[in-house]
Image (cartoon, grey):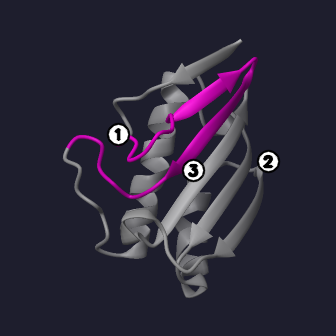
Amino acid sequence: MKKIITSKNAPAPIGPYSHGVMMGNTLYVSGQVGKHPQTGELMLTDIKTETTRVMENIKGILTDAGMDFTHVVKTTIFLKDLNNFSAVNETYGTYFSGDYPARETVQVSRLPLDVNVEISVVAIK
């Protein structure tokens, strides 16, 4: 059975997609950007602040699905500038405690809302 996950702890989708889709015990989380869920403010001050907001949005969706970062098995990171790779890694890494998920990081020419980083995850309960 497919279950749609909608979270008040992540910004409202800006298009026809869901925060997450649970299929059996697997959760597919849509790409999240550094937008504050309550204020709608884009947190673009610096890449670490932006990445923290992205990860907090993902955390909110995971929590609402009854999961946490220990359940994440795969992530995809999209960066507007690969020169931010180290700073994003530093912040991203604080959300995991070993047994890191599989991942790829790619540079893209543009992201929604002209943000600098977008991250999606797959988690299994």
Q: Are marks 3 and 2 in contact (CB under 8 Å)?
A: no
**Magenta part of the protein: which range?**
11-38
Q: Amino acid at mark 3?
A: Tyr
Let me know if residue 65 is in the magenta part: no
Q: Quadrant of residue 8?
A: top left
Q: Give the numbered dot on residue 99.
A: 2
Disc 1 to disc 2, C-alpha distance: 30 Å
Q: Is the magenta region chiefly helix, strand or loop?
A: loop
Where 68 falls versus 48 (above or below)? above
- In the rendered image, the residue lying farthest to the top is 1
Residue 3: % across, % down: 60, 17
- Say which residue label 3 marks: 95
Q: Amino acid at mark 2?
A: Asp
Secondary structure of residue under mark 2: loop
Secondary structure of residue under mark 3: loop
Where 31 falls versus 37 (above or below)? below
Q: Choose the circle earlier in sequence order: 1 or 3.
A: 1
Residue 42: % across, % down: 28, 61
The residue shown at (60%, 67%) is 78
Q: Amino acid at mark 1?
A: Ala
Q: Is residue 65 visible?
A: no
Q: Residues within 10 Å of mark 3 (few under 14, many from 20)?
A: some
The residue shown at (38%, 72%) is 114
The residue shown at (60%, 78%) is 85
- Say which residue label 1 marks: 12
Disc 1 to disc 3, C-alpha distance: 22 Å
